[in-house]
Structure formats: C-alpha cells, structure tokens
Image: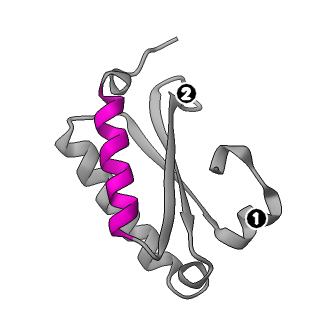
Amino acid sequence: MLMSPSIAKQREIDARIRGLAKRLSPDVVDIKYTISQDWSGDPGIFFRALISDDAGSKRLYEVSAKVERKVSEILDRLDVRDFPYFDYRIVSEQAALRDEAWV
C-alpha cells in the first residue's frame, strides 16, 4: 500500500480548503476530502463539494470549474502531487440521501 505524502500536509490542506469553502459561499456550502488510493493504487485526494441548490441548477459548470481551479491552486502552493478527484452534490440531493461521507 502506497502512503500519500499529502498526509503530512493534511493540517494545512484542511485549513485552506475550509477557507476556500467560506470564500465561495453561498454557492459552495462545504468541501470535504479524503486522502486515499485511486483505482490504480496511486495516492489521490478525493474532494466532495456540496453545492447550493441554486448554484447546482443554474451555474453548476461555472461553480465546479472554479472549485477545481482553486483547489488545484491550493495543492500546487502546498506542493501536493496527489491527483485530485472531484464529486459534486447539491444540498437537496444530500438531504434525501443522508450520506455520512458528505456531512
């Protein structure tokens, strides 16, 4: 099992991702992530962005592109080389699914 070097920087990643979610509010409600292995066994960072219903129905492409760009900038500044993966969900969808990974 490959260990991700990102784990050593997790505290910095946490702080910057929380700050990013606040700056992108109200379109972005929250951003969570998990450091794990991808399908090939390489280290990856799996981001889950919770998007407001309004942004999800009217500006999903714009908001998701901004999230991905800003997260990539954060990872570059921290010299994190794990590949980022992104999933998006709107608030009403999460309310129906009640998926613990998104809370």
Q: Which residue is mark 2?
A: 40
Compared with residue 100, is residue 73 higher up or lower down, i.e. above or below? below
Tell me where residue 75 appears, x and y as whole percent: 28, 43
**Residue in the image at 46% along x and 34% along y:** 44
Of the two numbered discs 1 and 2 in the rendering, the one whose residue sits closer to the viewer = 1
Please indicate, yes or no, whether residue 81 appears anywhere in the rendered image. Answer: no
Residue 98 falls within the magenta-colored stretch: no
> Which amino acid type is marked by label 1?
Ala
Q: Which residues are magenta?
A: 9-24
Q: Earlier in the sequence, mark 1 or mark 2?
A: 2
Q: Residue 95, which numbered label?
A: 1
Q: Main secondary structure of the magenta part?
A: helix
Please indicate, yes or no, whether residue 1 appears anywhere in the rendered image. Answer: yes
Q: Quadrant of residue 3?
A: top left
Q: Nearer the viewer, residue 23 or 78?
A: 23
Q: Secondary structure at mark 1?
A: helix
Q: Nearer the viewer, residue 58 or 42?
A: 58
**Residue in the image at 32% along x and 55% along y:** 19
Q: Dot 2 surroundings within 10 Å: few (below 14), some, or many (20 or more)?
A: few
Give the side of residue 78 with respect to residue 20, left or right: left
Tell me where residue 65 appears, x and y as whole percent: 40, 69
Q: Secondary structure at mark 2?
A: loop
Q: Residue furthest bottom?
A: 58
Tell me where residue 14 appears, x and y as whole percent: 37, 41
